[in-house]
Image (cartoon, rainbow, N blue to C red):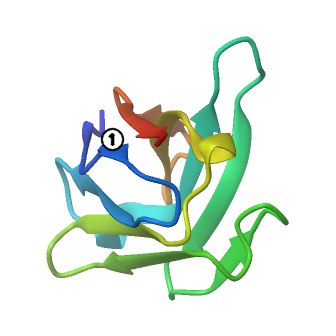
Amino acid sequence: QVQLVESGGGSVQPGGSLRLSCAASESFFNIWTIDWYRQAPGKQRELVATVTHIGLTNYADSAKGRFTASRDNAKNTAYLQMNSLTPEDTAVYYCSATSRSTLERFWGQGTQVTVSS
C-alpha cells in the first residue's frame, strides 16, 4: 500500500504560481507513473499532467505551457509547478501513483488550490 501526501496548495491571485508536492511512503523506483488530477466543484475529475518513471511528461491542453510535472526519485517526491494561474484552475488537486509491480493505483488526499482576486 503506497501512501501519498500532497502539499503546497493554497490561495493565489490570477497570474500567480504554486508548486504542489506529492510525497510517497515508499521508493519511487517502485512507481510507474505519477498522475496529477484535479476536480473543481460540480465537475468531473480530470487528468492534468503525467510524469513517467523516466521523467517523460504529458499534459492536458489546459495545462500545456503553464504547468510542469517532475519527480525526484531520490526524494520519493513528485512536483507540479503551476504558473500563470487563472480562476479556472481552482480545484482540489490529487496525485496518483501506479505501482510498477502490481499496476495498482493509489491516491493522495488532495490539496485545495484557489485562484481569485
Measuring from the top left, give residue 35's x and y in whole percent: 57, 55
At a point 48% along the width and 55% down the height, the residue shown is: 101
Q: Tell me which residue sits at (85%, 66%) in the image.
A: 61
Q: Is residue 96 above or below residue 112?
A: below
Q: Secondary structure at mark 1?
A: strand
- Horizontal arrangement in the rendering, residue 74 relative to residue 12 (left or right): left
Judge whether residue 67 can be spotted in this image.
yes
Q: Residue at x 42, y 52 (%)?
A: 13
Q: Position of residue 48 (x, y in %)?
A: 67, 55
Q: Position of residue 99 (x, y in %)?
A: 47, 52
* Depicted 107 relative to depicted 24: above or below: above
Q: Is residue 2 left or right of residue 93?
A: left
Q: Quadrant of residue 9?
A: top left
Rendering quarter of residue 59: bottom right
Under mark 1, the amino acid is Ser
Q: Nearer the viewer, residue 41 or 16?
A: 16
- Vertical comparison of 101 with 77: above or below: above
The answer to whether residue 109 is left or right of residue 66 is left
- In this rendering, does residue 103 appear at all? no
Provide the residue designation for mark 1. Answer: 11
Which of the pair 73/114 is nearer the observer? 114
Q: Quadrant of residue 70?
A: bottom left
